[in-house]
Image (spheres, rainbow, N blue to C red):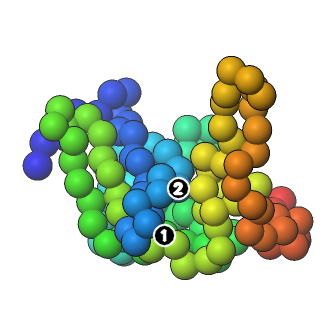
Amino acid sequence: MELKYQDELIPAVIQDEKTGKVLMLGYMNSAALDETLRSGFVTFYSRSRKKLWVKGETSGHKLRVREIRVDCDRDAVLVRAELTGPGCCHLGYESCFFRALTPEAGEAIVEPCRFDPGEVYKEKRP
């Protein structure tokens, strides 16, 4: 299937396969998508580090692929996945979308923290 990459990247929306909740947004290049398909675990391309990375490689909270869909314009993918740990967000939340913006309150945290990132990442990060 021919996908439409922009600057060699395609946005990948990650969705919990059971609840439908959006867990995160990442970017894949063709190598990351190939590795995701091959391994069965979500692999992204890090724009800052300029290399592939498996989501959860440090925390152990990986994303097991259940289905990959392509949007109508073929310029984005939706990955329906099973989260293997308590959260997807490196700040300790289930979803990276744990904040809400409202006209009244501005920014507010609307989800509970699921794990202590200080414990999960202790001595695992450089």
Q: Left of 54 or right of it: where is 118?
A: right
Q: Left of 68 or right of it: where is 16?
A: right
Dot 1 amino acid type: Leu
Q: Would residue 13 be visible to someone looking at this image?
A: yes
Q: Would residue 52 be visible to someone looking at this image?
A: no
Q: Which circle marks residue 87 in the picture?
A: none
Q: Give x and y (percent) for residue 59.
A: 69, 71
Q: Left of 92 or right of it: where is 52?
A: left
Picture residue at 64% right of the left edge, 67% below the top: 87
For the residue pair 89 and 18, the one nearer the viewer reads as: 18
Q: Is residue 54 above or below residue 8?
A: below
Tell me the crowding category of disc 2: few under 14, some 14 to 19, or many 20 or more residues within 10 angstroms, Cα based: many
Q: What element carries label 1?
A: strand
Q: What element carries label 2?
A: strand
Residue at mark 1: 63
Q: Earlier in the sequence, mark 1 or mark 2?
A: 2
Residue at mark 2: 23
Q: Give x and y (percent) for residue 19.
A: 43, 66
Q: Give x and y (percent) for residue 119.
A: 87, 73
Q: Left of 25 or right of it: where is 76?
A: left
Picture residue at 23% right of the left edge, 54% below the top: 69
